[in-house]
Image (spheres, rainbow, N blue to C red):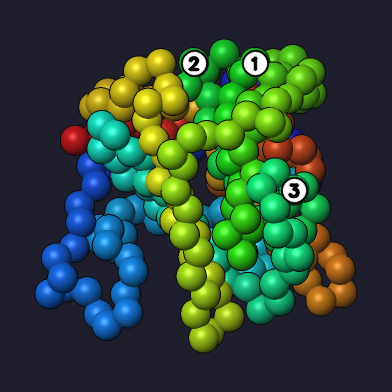
Amino acid sequence: MITIQPGQAVPVYECRPVVFRTPAEMGEGDIRHIDWERYEAAALTDTVTGLTVREATEVRACWSSEWVYVLFTCRDAHVVSNFQHRDDPLYEQDVVELFIDEVKAGTEYIELEVSPHNVVFDARIWNDGHRSITASDVSWDMEGLETAVKHDADGGWTCEIRIPTHHFLALPCSGRSWNVNFYRIDEDPQGSREFQAWSPTGEVNYHIPSRFGKLVFVD
């Protein structure tokens, strides 16, 4: 495992404005209207050790004043995903996750999860500011949230999340930032679960706000 020192630096992602592709630039059957290739890919690593993971995951993000867009690209030779209903405990099987702390206090944040079959879990979380949940509101739904999942023939899937910005205290603009972390849980055929993170936490616990990275909105 890695040892997280107090004040240890967290990663920073420069989130650039969204650019859409023209119909002429899109292939037949291509649903990805955003030109995702122009954005930096952030790799997830083992959340405990910080080492390379078995099934690679990359995350990209971009923004407009109305939406923040996030794309997870996952290699996955063995999908485990049986849940069918919103707010089912998706974290018990394969899932990608995004935590957003707009205020950066570490005591209240949004948790978004999407399964490989495009089932959504969304909740408001309250934290003691260290590593423990003190309360949660799973009944809360992020109105207007849009998600799309696409599987390929090579054993992979992508998840695009479109987050409406009217849920936040201030709209994104150049220079503003959120504290965020990107996660993935993946189970292999033997039932062994791999816990991935953009900013490793040093333990199998995603609810450590001090380890959230920084998503900076830039022009």
Helix, strand or loop at label 2? It is loop
Image quarter of the C terminus? top left
Residue 135 x %, y %: 76, 20
Residue 88 - label:
3
Residue 8 x %, y %: 59, 27
Q: Residue at x 62, y 55 (%)?
A: 119
What type is the residue that disc 2 sits on? Answer: Val
Helix, strand or loop at label 1? It is loop
Q: Which residue is mark 1?
A: 107
Q: Which residue is mark 2?
A: 103
What type is the residue that disc 1 sits on? Answer: Thr
Q: Earlier in the sequence, mark 3 or mark 2?
A: 3
Query: Left or right of 144: which side holds 79?
Result: right
Q: Nearer the viewer, mark 1 or mark 3?
A: 3
Query: Left or right of 137: which side holds 164?
Result: left
- How many neighbours does mark 3 have within 10 angstroms: few (below 14), some (14-19), or many (20 or more)? some
Using the image as rendered, state which of residue 15 and residue 166 is in the foreground: 166
Q: Residue at x 58, y 41 (%)?
A: 112
Residue 118 x %, y %: 57, 59
